[in-house]
Amino acid sequence: MSEKVKILLADDDPDFIEINKTILETKGYEVDEAYTSSEALNKIRATRYDLLILDLMMEEKDAGFTVAYAVREDENLKDLPILMLTSAQEKTGFTFKFSKDKEWMKVDDFAAKPLKPAELVERVEKLLK
């Protein structure tokens, strides 16, 4: 019997976590949650996850980037796929072009929140391949 795929969902919005956790669990994934960047990093270092879904703006406006950079700099974690989700454009007016900005973002995929359930699952499945 194979183990379930483990996903860490890091976001400071409990409603966002609950909704997306439910979506992913109905697809058979095991989902853990973190509400701050430090909690996310502690969990990533203590548990093997197959994917990190990460909010950009948590306790700091760039908390997600801080986590992504820490993951990429850690020899044991650097290959962990990261999907960054954010409402930064809505909140700040600043836009990212993933095709142009992905080198410095240090994530594998990037999307604006909220994602429709089917799109979230599609992006997760693509990153897990």
Image (spheres, rainbow, N blue to C red):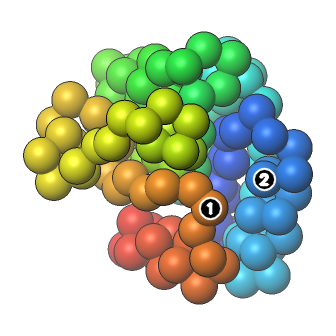
Residue depicted at 43% across the width and 57% down the height: 111
Kindly indicate the quadrant of the structure image that contains residue 123.
Answer: bottom left
Residue, disc 2: 16
Residue 102 circle label: none
Residues packed near mark 1 inside 10 Å, few (<14), some (14 to 19) or many (20 plus): few
Q: Are marks 2 and 1 in contact (CB under 8 Å)?
A: yes
Q: What kind of element bears circle 2?
A: helix
User: In the rendered structure, which amino acid carries the disc numbered 1?
Assistant: Pro
Nearest to the observer: residue 17 or residue 70? 17
Is 17 rendered above or below residue 68? below
Is 6 rendered above or below residue 91? below
Nearest to the observer: residue 73 or residue 95? 95
Q: Position of residue 119 (x, y in %)?
A: 52, 78
Is 63 rendered above or below residue 79? above
Extreme-left residue of the structure: 100
In screen coordinates, is 62 left or right of 42?
left
In screen coordinates, is 92 left or right of 3?
left
| Real-space Cα separation, disc 2 to disc 1, in angstroms | 8 Å
In screen coordinates, is 38 left or right of 92?
right
User: In the rendered structure, which amino acid carries the disc numbered 2?
Assistant: Phe
Nearest to the observer: residue 81 or residue 64? 64
The quarter in which the N terminus is drawn is: bottom right
Residue depicted at 54% across the width and 19% down the height: 61
Nearest to the observer: residue 110 or residue 8? 110
Residue, disc 1: 114
Q: Can see residue 12? A: yes
Kindly indicate the quadrant of the structure image that contains residue 60.
Answer: top right
Q: Position of residue 54 (x, y in %)?
A: 56, 42
Residues packed near mark 2 inside 10 Å, few (<14), some (14 to 19) or many (20 plus): some
**How many numbered dots are placed on residues in this image?**
2
